[in-house]
């Protein structure tokens, strides 16, 4: 379907004619010798300068009309199908602390950093969430919205490529990460609002206590699923700082009505993501968003070449 973004621009079309008709002359006086038709005929009649002037005027009008058409914004709407939607907003909130650098997970049969295992599994999980509006948050010392909630799950999954240790610090602000997810979800009117919270450590940064934020999530009717990632939890640590606070993450899930998962291997992580992926409300169809193909560059190019040709004609007859 053809459309113009600004059809009122066509009111400018008669502007050059009106300017020539009503603006005062510049005061210069020109002269011409009128030659009888018989004499003109006997000498070939044609006036090259007059023909050039006539051609220049035609090109000038072509340039003006093409320019007005370009300014009006011609475009066509492309056919698109309706998008499936679950009516759910899902914030994937991932730990980006220094401990995610540990190489105690496996990918494709090789040892890998926890970060790389998390990125690989999380990307596949996000790509499989067509119908959800998925957002992405990274947290460590600081918290950062990497991607706001969007139906474009491919773009959200690609955003994981930019995850790097140290990007938002090296500590673990679990409470602040969850708090930022809730802040984003408070701005939506989705029927279902869910947070996936992954951590491999203990809350040791930020200003928010994780359980207090979990109570706020409960008040907001936001369900939080938690993943405790790493080989050791606090009771098994024996003074080793590389432990995950399984108890706190379980409490967060219990308070909000979510599920808690204990992950020690890459396979455990995949199984946890698969279990969360099974939470699927009834799908419906969202109104299709119009996609426009802009056509203004074509008349704009015609205007450019018409002006260039007019300048060339004038220079040759100048």
Image: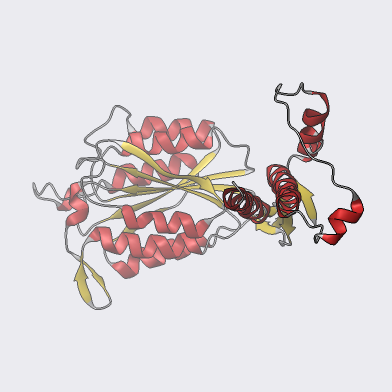
Where residue 41 sits in the image (x, y, percent)?
Answer: 87, 59
Measuring 51% from the left and 57% from the top, which residue is drawn there? Answer: 153
Q: Please say which color scheme the image uses.
A: secondary structure
Measuring 76% from the left and 53% from the top, which residue is drawn there? Answer: 47
Which image quarter is the N terminus in?
bottom right
Identify which residue, 281 or 166, lies in the foreground: 166
Measuring 78% from the left and 50% from the top, which residue is drawn there? Answer: 3
- Residue 286 visible, this orientation: no
User: Going by the image, does 199 lie left or right of 85?
Assistant: left
Identify which residue, 55 or 279, lies in the foreground: 55
- Quarter occupied by residue 231: bottom left
User: Going by the image, does 91 lie left or right of 249?
Assistant: right
Where residue 302 sits in the image (x, y, percent)?
Answer: 66, 55
Where residue 301 sits in the image (x, y, percent)?
Answer: 62, 54
Identify which residue, 298 or 16, lies in the foreground: 16
Q: Is residue 299 above or below residue 34?
A: below
Q: Residue furthest bottom?
A: 109
Identify which residue, 10 or 241, lies in the foreground: 10
């Amino acid at each position: 379907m053809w459309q113009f973004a600004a059809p009122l621009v066509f009111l400018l079309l008669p502007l050059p004619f009106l300017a020539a008709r009503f603006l005062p002359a510049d005061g210069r006086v020109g002269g011409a010798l009128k030659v009888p038709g018989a004499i003109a005929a006997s000498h070939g009649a044609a006036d090259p300068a007059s023909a050039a002037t006539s051609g220049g005027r035609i090109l000038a009008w072509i340039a003006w009309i093409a320019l007005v058409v370009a300014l009006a914004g011609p475009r066509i709407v492309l056919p698109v199908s309706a998008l499936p939607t679950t009516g759910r907003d899902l914030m994937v909130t991932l730990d980006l602390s220094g401990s995610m650098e540990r190489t105690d997970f496996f990918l494709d049969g090789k040892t890998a950093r926890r970060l790389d295992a998390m990125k690989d599994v999380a990307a596949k999980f996000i790509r499989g969430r067509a119908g959800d509006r998925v957002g992405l948050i990274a947290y460590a010392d600081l918290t950062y919205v990497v991607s706001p909630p969007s139906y474009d799950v491919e773009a959200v999954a690609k955003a994981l490529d930019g995850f790097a240790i140290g990007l938002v610090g090296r500590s673990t602000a679990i409470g602040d990460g969850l708090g930022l997810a809730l802040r984003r979800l408070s701005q939506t009117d989705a029927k279902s609002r869910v947070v996936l919270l992954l951590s491999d450590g203990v809350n040791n940064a930020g200003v928010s206590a994780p359980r207090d934020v979990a109570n706020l999530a409960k008040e907001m009717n936001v369900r939080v699923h938690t993943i405790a990632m790493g080989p050791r939890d606090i009771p098994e640590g024996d003074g080793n700082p590389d432990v995950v606070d399984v108890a706190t993450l379980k409490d967060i899930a219990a308070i909000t009505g979510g599920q808690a998962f204990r992950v020690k291997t890459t396979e455990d992580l995949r199984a946890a993501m698969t279990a969360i992926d099974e939470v699927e409300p009834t799908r419906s169809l969202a109104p299709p968003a119009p996609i426009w193909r802009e056509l203004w560059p074509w008349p704009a190019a015609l205007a450019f070449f018409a002006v260039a040709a007019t300048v060339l004609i004038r220079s040759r007859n100048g």
